[in-house]
Image (spheres, rainbow, N blue to C red):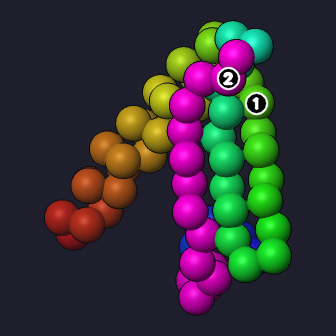
Amino acid sequence: MGINDESNIEANLQIGPTDQGMVRLFIEGTGIEIPMDFDPSEADDIAEEIKAAAMAARVISKK
């Protein structure tokens, strides 16, 4: 499955700080839980990538 492949899989995403000073992305779907921990600097990089992707998606949707 790639970035442009559609799926009907449902999942929940939670984002928050851990008690160890990390940022956790917690993905939960049917029969699966994926905790992903990042140090704050990595989390900042991920946030920038998400914002850049959102800007690019806006450009594509205007075409």
Q: Residues within 10 Å of mark 2 (few under 14, many from 20)?
A: few
Q: Left or right: 48 with respect to 55? A: right
Q: Nearer the viewer, residue 18 or 38?
A: 18
Query: Is 51 left or right of 19, judged from the image as shown?
Result: left
Q: Position of residue 56 (x, y in %)?
A: 36, 49
Mark 1 secondary-structure assignment: strand
Query: At 26% across and 54% down in the image, what residue appears?
Result: 59
Please say if the residues under marks 2 and 1 sit with CB atoms less than 8 Å apart: yes
Q: Residue at x 55, y 38 (%)?
A: 15
The mark found on residue 9 in the picture is: none
Residue 21 location (% of width, % of height): 69, 11
Relative to 46, 28 lies left or right? right
**Residue beneath disc 1:** 37
Which mark, residue 18?
2
Residue at the (47%, 27%) spot, across then down? 48
Q: Estimate the x, y position of residue 7 in percent, counting from the top left.
A: 61, 84
- Rendered position, 23 above or below 14: above
The three-letter code of the residue at mark 2 reads Thr
Q: Which residues make up the magenta segment?
A: 5-19
Q: Is residue 59 magenta?
A: no
Residue lying farthest to the front in this orientation: 19
Quadrant of the rendering where the C terminus is positioned: bottom left
Distance in Å between CA atoms under marks 2 and 1? 8 Å
Observer-side mark, 2 or 1, equals 2
Residue 24 at x, y percent in the picture: 67, 33
Image label count: 2
Image quadrant holding the N terminus, namely bottom right
